[in-house]
Amino acid sequence: MIVLVILFSVVAFALASPIAPEARASHELPTPVSAATAMTYLASLTVGVDDNVPAYNRSRFKHWHIVSGTCDTRKTVLKRDGTDVVVDAACKPTSGNWVSPYDDVTTTVASQFDIDHIVPLKEAWVSGARLWTDAKREAFANDLTLPQLVAVSARSNRSKGDKDPALWVPPSASYLCTYIRAWVEIKYKYHLAVDATEKTVLTDYLAACSVEEVDS
Ligand SMILES: *[C@@H]1O[C@H](CO)[C@@H](O)[C@H](O)[C@H]1NC(C)=O
Ligand SMILES: *[C@@H]1O[C@H](CO)[C@@H](O)[C@H](O)[C@H]1NC(C)=O
């Protein structure tokens, strides 16, 4: 089953190339490293087996915290990722436009969007974060400096769940390389492990994304 999903994803990806240039540069997460750099990062990651002992506990990743004034991490990402965003005194968006890069769903109602952790909190836990301090987990869960947080449709966040790229990638082909490069950069910067299947899939995607970079 996993193999089928991988095959399908790789084939779908190949058919969808070449990928349209990103049109959202000023309203999105920090630009991830190139596919070529991500390849070198991926090669250095520890390959391990996901370990859920002690069992994942979402409360061990404190979020959201205050970033500035009344703006917590969630509201800060909503302001960053939307256009014409107006917020009230509590930093709550009262109007604006958002496009979910995962599935191109649009909204003018911020509450319909989730802030997704590109590397999910549970994925981080089983690949190393269970051994961190609570302070480091809080930094991870609220990290605005790496390409880790993105405002997306609630539907796409829920279909993703805790899945890694062997089981789920964004349905929007134009966002696939950004997503994979971000995934690898986060794993690398936080010294998180990858499992063997995940590494194979990431390698295949990055190879295709590198071709794209050379072509463009
Ligand atoms: C999860 O972590 C929180 C915060 O540390 C703690 O209060 C809670 O008891 C934990 N839940 C379980 C089921 O261990
Ligand atoms: C996004 O998905 C994750 C993983 O299923 C879930 O834990 C989280 O609650 C979702 N985010 C929101 C804001 O619903």
Image (cartoon, rainbow, N blue to C red):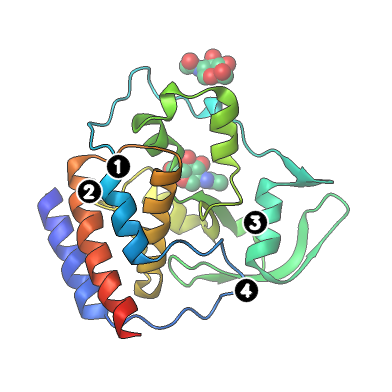
Contact between labelled residues 3 and 1, with CB atoms less than 8 Å apart: no
Answer whether labels 1 and 2 touch (C-beta < 8 Å).
Answer: yes
Three-letter code for the amino acid on which mark 4 is drawn: Ser
Q: Residue at x 18, y 42 (%)?
A: 196
Q: Earlier in the sequence, mark 3 or mark 2?
A: 3
Going by the numbered disc 2, the residue's amino acid type is: Lys
Q: Position of residue 122 (x, y in %)?
A: 41, 35
Name the residue tied to disc 2.
Answer: 199
10 Å neighbourhood of mark 3: few (<14), some, or many (≥20)?
Answer: many
Give how far across and how far down residue 112 sits, in percent: 59, 58
Mark 3 or mark 2, whichever is nearer to me:
2
Q: Is mark 1 within 8 Å of ligand 2?
A: no
Q: Earlier in the sequence, mark 3 or mark 4?
A: 4
Judge depth for marks 1 and 2 and give the one in front. Answer: 1
Q: Which residue is mark 4?
A: 26
Q: Distance from label 4 to label 2 (Cα)?
A: 30 Å
Which label is found at residue 45?
A: 1
* Left-right relation of 145 to 154: right
Q: CA distance from mark 3 to mark 2?
A: 29 Å
- Residue annotated with mark 3: 77
